Image (tube, rainbow, N blue to C red):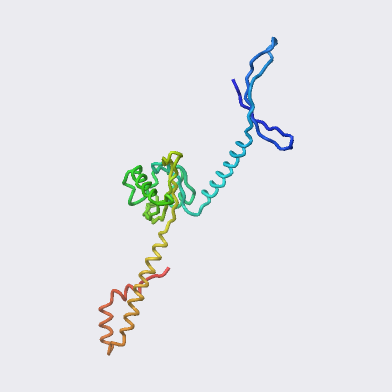
Amino acid sequence: SQVPVEFRIQNSTGSWRWFVACGSTVEYASDGTIAKIKGSTLDIDDHKRAVEGMRGSEKRLSTIFRSAPGSMAVTDNEGRLIDANQAFYDMLGYSAEELQGVPIMSFSEGLRDKDSKIVMADIFRECESYEDRRFHIEENFLCRDGRRITVDFGLSSISDTDGIVQNYIFSGIDVTQQKKHAAELKLLAENQRWLFDFLRQFNQFDGIVQLFEALQENLPQVISFSSLKLI
């Protein structure tokens, strides 16, 4: 049998190059020792450098993936979880072991009851309609502790050389608090507009009785404005 052996050889310029050699015994001496060997040697230095470069790139990408502040996950072509960073697990409140192989859309309040493969196929068609093959949406996700959070997320597809989707990349951010604050600011603006309009009309009242009557008519708005909490 042939056993490949990798080794380095220093050339005339003093640099080192990697080679791989494969050989087999073709003749033995009368005492049983090897008399003749045939084999081949191949320069694999460029290949070794390319592999090392790829490993370095993979390590850098893995570091970015693991340390990203936003939630990131990788699924198969049916949306089942393969890997995710810690931010993703923290967002939903599950461990890596609990989510391995679980359809990622099963946490979506609007998509959890639908077939994961069909959902991902629909998303893929949406991806195809975008120039960067990226789908972007907001969905309510259900956490382990029962909380409902709003996640702003995107999905990108990864295809093989034949154009067949192999994986999806999920990246999302919990925007629950941002949306809550936006709603509160909108309510504040609406109440401010009502109050300013009311004060502009203040000069129309001839007495305190008319003023109280106007306040009673607008009591719901007054209560809403006075009870609004700013965070």
Looking at the image, is 172 positioned above or below residue 196? above
Query: Percent from the top left, x then y, of residue 199?
Result: 33, 82
User: Considering depth in this image, is 42 or 84 the residue closer to the camera?
Assistant: 42
**Which residue is rendered at x = 31% and y = 46% of the image?**
114
Picture quadrant where residue 223 is located? bottom left
Of 87 and 114, which appears nearest the observer? 114
Q: What residue do we see at 26% from left, 82% from top?
A: 214
x, y percent for residue 191: 34, 74
- Spot occupied by residue 218 in the image (x, y as percentages of width and height): 27, 77
Q: Left or right: 56 with respect to 211?
A: right
Q: How many marks?
A: 0
Residue at far top of view: 30
Give me the residue at 69% from left, 15% from top.
35
The image shows residue 68 at horizontal and vertical percentages of 51, 52
Q: Quadrant of residue 222?
A: bottom left
Task: Judge by depth and name the residue closer to the eye, 42 or 151.
Answer: 42
Judge from the rendering whether residue 80 lies leftward or rightward of residue 67; answer left or right: left
